[in-house]
Amino acid sequence: MTDGIIKQKIDGVEVNITNVPKTIADCFKFRNKIGLDVALEALKEAWQSKRVTMDELWHYGKMCRVQNVMRPYLEALAS
């Protein structure tokens, strides 16, 4: 539950923020609620801006149990 969470102080209050690869995995996990297009756009933007690596995406995809859903999109990015 704490993997992928960054604790940050904002105006003196400590808040939990998820990192980019965990956020993308969560987008795929909740793709039926937010839409697959949102998850794909998040993946595309993060990959193009080099904010994530394939290993990080795979790790959090596995943790959120969506690695099989993410696999075709990650393979498309890698090629």
Image: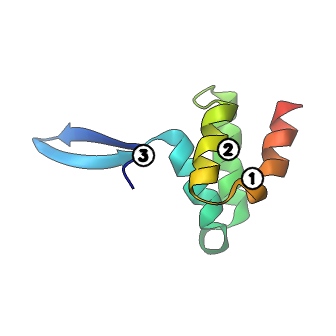
View extreme (left): residue: 12
- Rendered residue at 71%/40% (across/down): 44
Q: Quarter holding the C terminus?
A: top right
**Three-letter code, disc 3:** Asp
Kindly identify which numbered label has been placed on residue 3: 3
Residue at image position (65%, 66%) is 31
Question: Residue 43 — which label?
Answer: 2
Determine the CA span between mark 3 and mark 1: 19 Å
Q: Secondary structure at mark 1?
A: helix
Quarter-wise, where is residue 76 in the image?
A: top right
Residue 30 in picture, x, y percent from top left: 59, 67
Q: Is residue 65 left or right of residue 37?
A: left
- Which amino acid does the dot numbered 1 rest on? Met
The answer to whether the residue labelled 2 contacts the one labelled 1, judged by CB atoms less than 8 Å apart, is: yes
**What mark, if any, has residue 70 been given in the picture?**
1
Is 2 rendered above or below residue 48? below
| Quarter of the N terminus within the rendering | bottom left
For the point 67% across and 44% down, the residue is 43
Q: Marks 2 and 1, how far apart in space?
A: 10 Å
- Which of discs 3 and 2 lies nearer the camera? The answer is 3
Q: Residue furthest top?
A: 50
Q: Residue furthest right?
A: 79
Q: Residues within 10 Å of mark 2 (few under 14, many from 20)?
A: many
SS category of the residue bearing label 2: helix
